Amino acid sequence: MKKIIAVSFLVVFIFLGAISLVDAITVGPVKLQLNANPGQTIEGTMFLKNDDNTAVTFYPSIETFTEKNGEKVFIKVPNDLESWIKVPSSVKLPAGGSTNISFSITVPKNASPGGHFAIVWWSTTPPSSSSNHQVSIVTRAGILVYLNVSGNTIEEASFNLNGPIFAFGLPLNFNIHFENNGNVFLMPQGNLEIKNILGNSVDNLPFNQGGAIILPKTSQDFTLNWQDKGGFYFGPYQAVLNATYGQNSKTATVSHWFFLISWNSLIVIIILIILIFILPVLIRRYNKWIIEKSRNHS
């Protein structure tokens, strides 16, 4: 029983420790989008804050990454961005303290043109420290670095827009598949405009409002949700995506036609059908019944 109690206290202690360290560090910005020439050195700053109630020393580590199916995958690429970034070996901050950290990126003269990607981690544990004999709780937060190296850069992309063909009522979901076919990172943005059969705009939905970045030779799906704003919808509609991407703001337009009947319009249609087609028949039958009944009584 004593062993059980001791283990329980240990679990609770570790759990409380994990909670206290979850928000122990804040870094910024979330991502850096940079451009450089081969042989150039660029400089900047990162923000680091100690959210703990005690003094903490933070240590950096840098990893190169790519993406597969929208998920970041960390890889080792020799002589790439991971080794070009220089930051202080450690930063000690008092409780609640913050600072701006200088960094530099030196791009080799023979660097390949296009996109290079890494994440700068700031952790409470030195990267080289490891132990096989104890459980340690490590807090870390990262800053994404997207670097485009000039040269023979290619900005090519494709868009696909999919949605319902026939729908009763809202909301409706539209899927935008974006594929980056070039060698630099791209951040497509724009809006999805909903038009009626007369070409009048009914609604506008922002596309990639969060600023997602798509790496070269990868793709990502975006879902836009069209909500009901109390309108009367009936008939053919067109969803038109107007998007831009790349440093030169290339444009792309894709569209999708669909037929929409909202529930309020459906009720009106049913009432009209009754008034135009069914009610006259009922009236004629009633009149015929009245006439036959009067004849039978005469």
Image: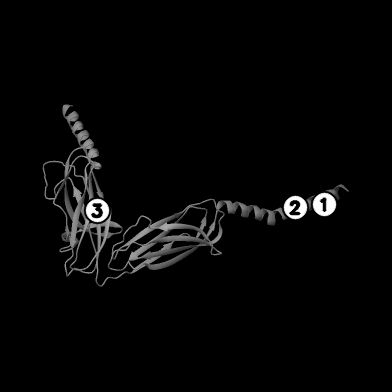
Residue 233, image x, y percentages: 55, 56
* Number of marks in picture: 3
Q: Classify mark 1: residues with Cα within 10 Å, few (<14), some (14-19) or many (20+).
A: few
Q: Is residue 35 left or right of residue 228?
A: left
131 lies above or below 189: above
Q: Residue furthest top?
A: 1
The residue carrying mark 2 is 283
The quarter of the picture where residue 223 lies is bottom left
Estimate how packed mark 3 is, as few (under 14), some (14 to 19) or many (20 or more) residues with alpha carbons within 10 Å: some
Screen quadrant of the N terminus: top left
Secondary structure of residue under mark 2: helix
* In front: label 1 or label 3: 3
Name the element at disc 3: strand
In whole angstroms, how far apart are the C-alphas of marks 2 and 3? 75 Å
Residue 64 drawn at (x, y percent):
20, 59
Amino acid type of the residue that numbered disc 2 sits on in the rendered structure:
Ile
Is 183 placed left or right of 1 in the picture?
right
Q: In front: 54, or 71?
A: 54
Residue type at mark 1 is: Ile
Mark 2 vs mark 3: which is more N-terminal?
3
Image spot of residue 118 (x, y percent)? 22, 58
Identify the residue at horizontal 19%, vertical 30% (top origin).
Answer: 4
- What is the number of the mark on residue 143? 3
What residue would you read off at disc 1?
291
